Image (tube, rainbow, N blue to C red):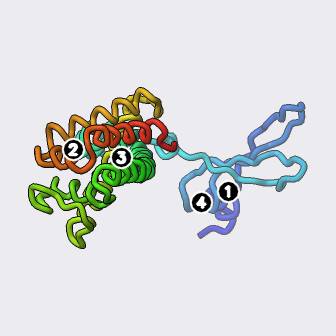
Amino acid sequence: MNPERAAGTPEPEHQGPKPVPYTYHDGREDYLHVGRQGGTEADQPTALVPPSEGMSPRVETTALPPEASALPPATTVPAEAASPPARASALPPEATALPPEAPRAAAQRPQQGARMSEIVTRGLRTGAALTAATMCTMMAASTLKRGSPWASMNAMATAVGLGGRRASDRFDPVVTPAGVAVLAGGLLAWGIGYEKALDATGKRSSPLTGALSALGGFLFDELILPDRLMKNFRDKMGVLGTLSKYVALGVASAAAPR
């Protein structure tokens, strides 16, 4: 090969970047070198970023084709598909919700229990006062009529079938204590019922309530208890003594402690 011809022939494979004029925004002019690098790879456009404070003097930026930089449009997912469907409740709200009366009734139960306990306590006190007043009156009346305080208690025992049809005047170890127990038990229950009636009507003990209590006691003995009871009362205490029993009942009811 001719050396002279070889020397005059340019070698395109080893050509450097081609300078391209560039004007900055402040008016300065410079050249950007764009061209083949090494002659082996495809031409790639490169640009030199002008130097500025705090940055490297040469930063090469590679331009990406629009197909690579463009992102596919975002796919919108419907709200119904994104969120799972709410699980249906097994029971309707009406079945799980408590009625508004339930908490109120639950709160009133302790109050009602305390109120009933107070009524029973007052009734027992009233019944004890009724028992004392009535028993003393009956024993005094039988003492005046028969000369024995136990005759009236024996007459009271005939209400439960003890002592026969005609009560004895003397103390009996079975009949007399039974008569006392019957009188005390009946008047304790009467006192509780009396206090319950006062609480239901919103009234307090008075002469009127005492008179009603005496009338109720007389009607109870006449209409509910056996006829032999009233016969023995009249026989052992007399008519006035029998009436004094109900008077004592009414007075003790009117003066019942609160």
For residue 234, the mark is 2
Q: Which residue sits at x=47%, y=42%?
A: 256
**Res. 26 image quadrant:** top right
The amino acid sitting under disc 2 is Arg
The amino acid sitting under disc 3 is Ile
Label 1, residues with CA under 10 Å away: few <14, some 14-19, many ≥20: few
User: N-terminal of the two: label 4 or label 3?
Assistant: 4
Distance between mark 4 and mark 1 Cα atoms: 7 Å
> What residue would you read off at disc 4?
39
> What residue would you read off at disc 3?
192
User: N-terminal of the two: label 4 or label 1?
Assistant: 1
Q: Nearer the viewer, mark 3 or mark 2?
A: 2
Tell me if I can see residue 78 in this picture.
Answer: no
Residue furthest out toward the top: 208
Q: Is residue 25 left or right of residue 146?
A: right
Q: Which quarter of the rendering shows the N terminus?
A: bottom right
> What residue would you read off at disc 1?
15
Proximity of marks 2 and 1: CB atoms separated by less than 8 Å: no
